[in-house]
Image (cartoon, coloured by chain):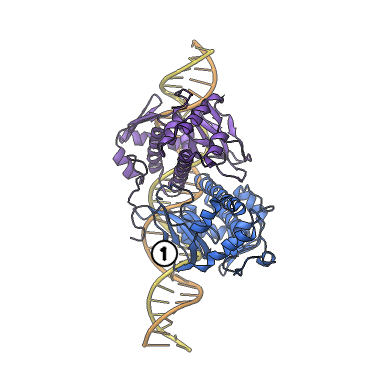
Chain colours: A purple, B blue, C orange, D yellow
Amino acid sequence: MGAIQWSNRSSPILHALSAFASLAPHELDLIAEQVLFTRFDAPLTELHAAGDSANQRILLSGWACRQRMLPDGRRQIINLIVPGDIIGPRQRPAIPAASATVALTDVETSDASNLLAAAEQQDYPGLRKALHAAAALEEFFSREQIVRLGRQTAHERMVHLMLELRLRLAAAGLGSADSFPMPLTQEVIADVLGVSAVHANRTLQQVRREGLLELRRGRVRILQPELMESIANWTLTTTGTNTPQPVSDWQG
Amino acid sequence: MGAIQWSNRSSPILHALSAFASLAPHELDLIAEQVLFTRFDAPLTELHAAGDSANQRILLSGWACRQRMLPDGRRQIINLIVPGDIIGPRQRPAIPAASATVALTDVETSDASNLLAAAEQQDYPGLRKALHAAAALEEFFSREQIVRLGRQTAHERMVHLMLELRLRLAAAGLGSADSFPMPLTQEVIADVLGVSAVHANRTLQQVRREGLLELRRGRVRILQPELMESIANWTLTTTGTNTPQPVSDWQG
DNA sequence: CGCAGGATTGATGTGGTTCAAGGGCGGTGG
DNA sequence: CCACCGCCCTTGAACCACATCAATCCTGCG
């Protein structure tokens, strides 16, 4: 291994990236260095402003989200950001974002320019592959979010979101197949799912009443994963890396 | 210019890409070559199957969409694909898509592997920049779609979609600031906007009654762009780099 | 103890869905 | 040249998932 000792603060990145590609020692070093210059921010802090087309960071701990506010106060959360995820534009030249990235809890971030720049070099093939795969996964869930919002009921959306978080947090080493931390308020969940906070509450209650999951003391416990996957039309297997799923022929 | 004559079949790509970066002669040649080996497909043809993680093509003419079918028949269209757009995964390794790409009209496509591979080389900087910018624009509209579906009313969604198509088709050289072709059925529009076909119909009628736009003989005419942008909370200026240019200017 | 933010619950309103039945129109065949 | 057919658009009526408004409850915390 490299000269720098692993701290558990870099472990989310390590988990998230090493799931996609095996990393060489000098690549691991680069990741470990991320914890050397970190910044702490409180909830509601804007980590990446709308209109900003630079400023790439990586989330080390805590939760954030990319969100879009409408003038009349409506908010849509584009996606949740958990440890290991990149904050800011991925590709250049970037279009100035209409959405801002905001901390949802206390967060720790570090500048990711080095990491992302290194991945463009020829001598960091593993890093390159891992970051591309992470971007592909993000794009995948972005499409899932579209399907969720466009064609699923509140009940299906809630179940689907919990499955997404289960997978992503497990990939970051922050949860297992059984359970994961859940620091989000119901209002935040509502703004992810595109429903009102009141309805998110009732939906969550129903999901719990049905025995699909448990939510206690800031932790979600998945009780019936297979049933949940069936309800939400889940298409990714959590076992293995990227195993594809049979998708029904749409023409029937 | 290069040895290959421009045909108007390659012009959508030319428009779409040259809007983002100035291209060198050898890059223009590569684009022109795209029309040499094309394929024609009828509506409903699956251009890119769900689960496929390869097979990159570019759309030369006609319309397509990436869609996800749910087992009970619900369909969500993730995004519309117009001439100049890439079909298939952008980055490798790609996660097998849960969504399929399907032709909505008669379409002409060509293999884009060469184009995309060339953009990774050092000697195609303009192409690289242009394709990255195109990907960034696609990602931008992907987020707009999330906001649309999550927090906007059917009326707002409809107006917003028409503004999106106005911009994208103008960028491909297929329309102006005033009008663009509209070959989509109301059912397709409904599946983009996440509403029922009946409601899409009523919403479209209202938008027309309000004098925001005209829809006749397969063509949309934008009548009150500023008002529409205000209604839909539009955040992109059409003036600037994305302004369409007539093909003739480019053929010089 | 009292406060504040989040969770919960009830009552009522509405945007949108669903079902069902026409209407227009281009294409095709007799 | 007309009759018919299929696809799409349009319209009406009933229904429902979810929004909105307004309390109230709970819990951690200073």
Question: Is any part of residue A5 visible from this angle?
Answer: yes
Q: Position of residue D4 (x, y in %)?
A: 38, 80
> Quadrant where the C terminus of chain B lies?
bottom right
Q: Position of residue A185 (x, y in %)?
A: 47, 30
Count of residue discs: 1
Question: Is any part of residue A195 visible from this angle?
Answer: no
Question: Which secondary structure lies at badge 1?
Answer: loop
Between B215 and A52, the one nearer to me in the picture:
A52
Q: Position of residue A201 (x, y in %)?
A: 42, 34
Above or below A67: residue A217: above
**Chain of the residue displaying label 1:** B
Q: Position of residue A225 (x, y in %)?
A: 31, 38
Q: Residues within 10 Å of mark 1 (few under 14, many from 20)?
A: some
> Quadrant where the N terminus of chain B lies?
bottom right
Q: Quadrant of residue B243?
A: bottom right
Above or below B144: residue A43: above
At a point 58% along the width and 32% down the height, the residue shown is A47
Residue type beneath disc 1: Thr
Between A39 and D17, the one nearer to me in the picture:
A39
Q: Which residue is mark 1?
A: B45
- In the rendered structure, the answer to whether residue B11 lies left or right of residue B98 reads right
